[in-house]
Image (cartoon, rainbow, N blue to C red):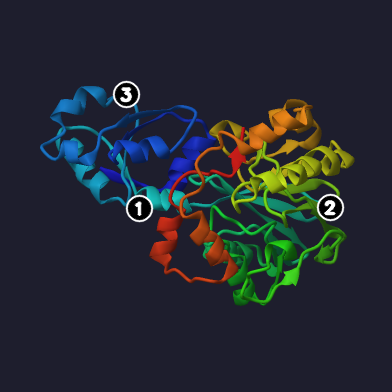
Amino acid sequence: MKAMTSKEVTKKVFDKEPLFILDVRNESDFNDWKIEGENFEYLNIPYFDLLDGVEEILDQVPTDKEVLVVCAKEGSSVMVAEMLDEAGREVSYLQGGMKAWSEHLEPVKVGELNDGGSMYQFVRIGKGCLSYAVVSNGEAALIDATRMTDVYLDFAKELGVEIKHVFDTHLHADHISGGRKIAEATGATYWLPPKDADEVTFNYQPLEDGNNVKIGETNIDINALYTPGHTIGSTSFVVDEKYLLSGDILFIDSIGRPDLAGKAEDWVADLRNSLYNRYKQLSDELVVLPAHFMIIEELNEDGSVSEKLGTLFAKNHGLNIEDEAEFRRLVTENLPPQPNAYQEIRETNMGKISPDDEKQREMEIGPNRCAVR
């Protein structure tokens, strides 16, 4: 019996390797959110049903595949893995449980910039969050950083670059931003769209349409493009005339939902205008880098999430609804459940409340729910 880390499981997801997962959480938790992989198989048996032993499930646990036992925090999976080990089965357990899975960030280099810089994407595989680092000539800018701030600080240290700017494309409602904390730790400038910042309790640099921020000594301009609809302040970035960071407005297989501030009916027109008019004015060759992914099939071969804007206009259903009434129905009716604790998350990102680390973990548990398909 051995521990398997979230990083090791992520590699299996990226490489499309087979894995059999015995998830011993309650059925409702498993159905709501689980580890996903294209070649993963699952068996969900709640831990309490296994207190008397694992003999009754042995015939359901394969001997010709790698087996991973998963629970919420680790303890229950260790006990079940030990029972399987005693029964002669070779198994692993997920180190840190689903809490660790929710927090793992995997950096992936998505491409070069025109004057020698690089674009990196941080894939939060268990939560569907995507954040970014633009690196050039010893400087870096971060976009939509999560609360796992050490990952970004260690990444910058490893590359030998100084974080100069930190951006949030909007006031997030599904996860806690690490932007302000990173800015405080590094002396970087923290940027936030002012229309999302009416209630924030801290100082920030207003991110507005047409802002140009240069990174390094090269002309890697980050151009802010006001694209409301997910929130009233949602702002996209065109980086180096090559990448479009779309925040939570446009995803690979879906579009953003307009209801997380309770303003769905008010913001539908903004959402449609941003997607169907403002984005239409941009080059089809721009590579779209969203702030989330929704399904595992959106991952590219290297584990990154991206697609050319022109391809999305051809294939993304949310960009091809001619009838405005139908579009309105799509983004206001039959929406998925709202993110767990989203009001508390918004208040945390405004600086109104300061939950401790354990509370922040609990607030974020669960899948990405920022999209409509």
Determine the secondary structure under disc 1. Answer: loop
Residue 298, located in which quarter of the rendered image? top right
Determine the secondary structure under disc 3. Answer: loop
Characterize the local packing of mark 3: few (<14), some (14-19) or many (20 or more) Cα atoms within 10 angstroms: few
Query: Total marks drawn?
Result: 3
Precedes in sequence: disc 1 or disc 3 = 3
Disc number at residue 277?
A: none
Label 1, on which residue? Answer: 96
Label 2, on which residue? Answer: 240
Characterize the local packing of mark 1: few (<14), some (14-19) or many (20 or more) Cα atoms within 10 angstroms: many
Residue at coordinates 79% horizontally, 44% vertically from top-left?
274
Residue at coordinates 63% horizontally, 38% vertically from top-left?
332
Precedes in sequence: disc 1 or disc 2 = 1
Q: Could you tell me if residue 253 is visible in this image?
A: no
Q: Quadrant of the C terminus?
A: top right
Residue 169, located in which quarter of the rendered image? bottom right
Q: Position of residue 174 (x, y in %)?
A: 54, 52
Q: Nearer the viewer, mark 1 or mark 3?
A: 1
Residue type of the residue flagged with mark 1 = Gly
